Structure formats: C-alpha cells, structure tokens
Amino acid sequence: MNYTSIKHFHIACATLSGGLFFLRGIWMLRESAMLKQSWVKLVPQAVDTLLLVSALTMVIWSGQYPFVQNWLTVKILAVIAYIAIGSIALKRGKTKTVRVYAFIAALATFAYIASVAVTKQVLVLG
Ligand code: HEM
C-alpha cells in the first residue's frame, strides 16, 4: 500500500466516521431506540480505530509529527475536543438541551478538523 492509498483510506474513514456521528446525533435528537442497537456502538468504534491507525501510519511515513507541525498539533487537540464533546452529545449530556448544544459544537469541531486537514493551516480564514 502506498501513501496515497492510505490517505484515501484515511479520508474515507473520516467521512464514514463523521457520517456515523451525524446519524447517531439525529437519533439522539429523535430519542430513537436505534441508538441502543449493538452495531451502533461497534461499527463507529471499528471505523475510528482504522481512522487512527491510518493517521499514525501517515504521521510516521511522511515524517510530519504533532508538536513539530502546527497543523497536526492543532488537529490532534481538536480531535480530542471532538471526542469529548461528541460523547456529551451522544450519552454524557444530562439534559436534552446540553446534548443538542454539544451536538452542534461537535459538528463544528469536525468541520474545523477537516478544514485544518485540507489546508494544513490552523486558522481557516483564507
Ligand atoms: C476526526 C478526525 C479526522 C479527520 C476528519 C481527518 C481528515 C483528514 C483529511 C480530509 C485529510 C486529507 C487532507 C488532504 O486533502 O490533503 C487528512 C490527512 C491527514 N491526516 Fe487526518 N483526519 C482526522 C484525524 C487525524 C489524526 C488524529 C491524525 C494524526 C494523529 C491525522 C493525521 C493526518 C495526516 C498525517 C494526513 C496526511 C497529510 C498529508 O500528507 O497530506 N488525522 N485527514
């Protein structure tokens, strides 16, 4: 497998991961029992693991390291924030209002991560 294939794989995992998060968020808003199905826990976990493995492979292969490359440092911090805010949205938020705001914030964070990834700029203001 070459670098370009890994990168395409990483982008596919990122898209799928974001899509699955969005779907679970919609189910959370609708208070749907779909959220409780076992595959709804397992599949996103597997996709996120592949997303991370492909990310680490590219970090090593390309020699672009977090805490060396600013955009990667910011990307990792934003991913950590996204995971934390995302888990408030899908389960840890005590009230529906908290979960809804967390869902919106998590989607905005995801969009920021994607734009940092594409532009390799920390501030995406053009
Ligand atoms: C929600 C999580 C993530 C999303 C949405 C995401 C998204 C993306 C996208 C869209 C690209 C392609 C950019 C381009 O077109 O050149 C990319 C590339 C990359 N990502 Fe991620 N990523 C995520 C997590 C991570 C993490 C956690 C790391 C590091 C530990 C990482 C490291 C990289 C690297 C090294 C590249 C390749 C840069 C290059 O050589 O062009 N990604 N990511």
Image (spheres, helix red, strand yellow):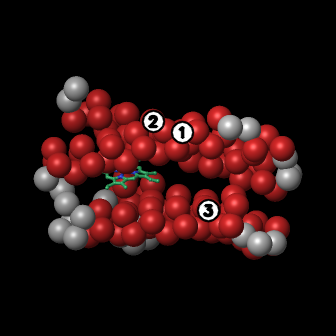
In this rendering, the label closer to the viewer, 1 or 3: 3
Work out whether residue 96 can be spotted.
yes
Q: Are marks 3 and 2 in contact (CB under 8 Å)?
A: no
Residue drawn at (18%, 56%) of the image: 64
Asked where in the image residue 44 lies, by quadrant, the reply is: top right
Label drawn at residue 102: none
- Dot 1, crowdedness within 10 Å: few (<14), some or many (≥20)? some
Determine which residue is flagged by label 1.
16
Q: Quadrant of the C terminus?
A: bottom left
Residue drawn at (85%, 53%) of the image: 31
Determine which residue is flagged by label 3.
87
Query: Farthest top residue?
Result: 1
Q: Is residue 37 above or below residue 119?
A: above
Q: Earlier in the sequence, mark 3 or mark 2?
A: 2
Work out whether residue 15 can be spotted.
no
- Residue type at the position of mark 2: Ala
* 41 relative to 36 in the view: left or right: left
* 73 relative to 49 in the view: left or right: left
| Residue 12 rendering spot, x and y as whole percentages | 45, 36
Q: Is residue 123 above or below residue 23?
A: below
Q: Are marks 2 and 1 in contact (CB under 8 Å)?
A: yes
Q: Look at the numbered disc 2 and give the secondary structure of its residue.
A: helix
Q: Is residue 46 above or below residue 124?
A: above
Label drawn at residue 12: 2
